[in-house]
Amino acid sequence: MELKDNERINEINEGLRIIESKNALTFGTDAYLLSAYLPKRSNATAVELGCGSGVVSFLALTKKKCRHVYGIEVQSSICDIARRNAELNSLDSSFTALNKDLRDCSTTDTSGEVDIVFSNPPYMKSSSGKPNESEEKNLSRHEICGDINDFCKCAARLLKFGGDFYVVYRPDRMAELIYALKSNKLEPKNITFVYPNSHTPPSLLLVSSRLGGKGGMKISKPLFIYKDGTSEYTEEFKKIYENCNIDTGK
């Protein structure tokens, strides 16, 4: 696979080899946790909103959590990386990269309604924080090409009735996320809070919701990444990395 300027290939979980640009966001804990949060539905058709290099989609496909993924990415240079990553990992027959603004996406782009939508959306408002030097990182981290309501609206537009939307987000913006979900008829069903350790506030949250679902939400047991006072993973987190699965107690 020929690499372009500022690109490198990294080997990650499940033996996947991923082309990443030094100017774009790289694979991190939040992306892996989102892939682990997805249930195994081997015949499902899925959409990833803001797929980036495609890592979450490829982990989901490798672990048989869905049959086909449409990866929607607004940045053409990063969408091209996702296409090449699918080819590099022999997943090009089960992954379709779409260079589109999610605010313009419809079921005509995905050959009909889908079973699952998942996303690791930008966490920061367009006016907050210090902009990154890289335009690619700036677009990935800030709500420039769609805020959380746009992501939820797109998910609702693409899902079958009863379909599920999975998202990883920041705890300090949980109220905005829940409001956006419910405003688009996506009923929150499960929340898992992720903590660096037992002495710190949560750093991430994982939320599943259902289009047209009945009321009733479950809070899963907290997930701690590190043992207190160390940089060593907890036993539970080690199992998540081994199995790419988070037990929500369903």
Image (tube, grey):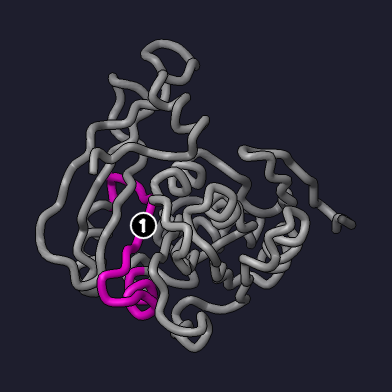
Q: Which residues are magenta?
A: 152-173
Along the line of sight, the residue nearer the viewer: 193 or 124: 193
Specify whether 134 is left or right of 28. Answer: right
Name the residue rendered at 46%, 64% in the picture: 43
What is the quadrant of the C terminus in the image?
A: top left
At mark 1, the secondary structure is strand
- The answer to if 170 sits in the magenta stretch is yes
Name the residue rendered at 70%, 53% in the picture: 23
Residue 22, horizontal then vertical, whole percent: 73, 49
- The answer to if 213 sits in the magenta stretch is no
Amino acid under label 1?
A: Tyr
Along the line of sight, the residue nearer the viewer: 42 or 49: 42
The residue labelled by disc 1 is: 166
The mark tally for this picture is 1
Name the residue rendered at 54%, 52% in the picture: 56
What is the quadrant of the N terminus in the image?
A: bottom right
Residue 239, horizontal then vertical, whole percent: 45, 27
Question: Mark 1 Cα within 10 Å, few/some/many (few <14, many 20+)?
Answer: many
Name the residue rendered at 37%, 72% in the picture: 155
Q: Is residue 201 above or below residue 110?
A: above
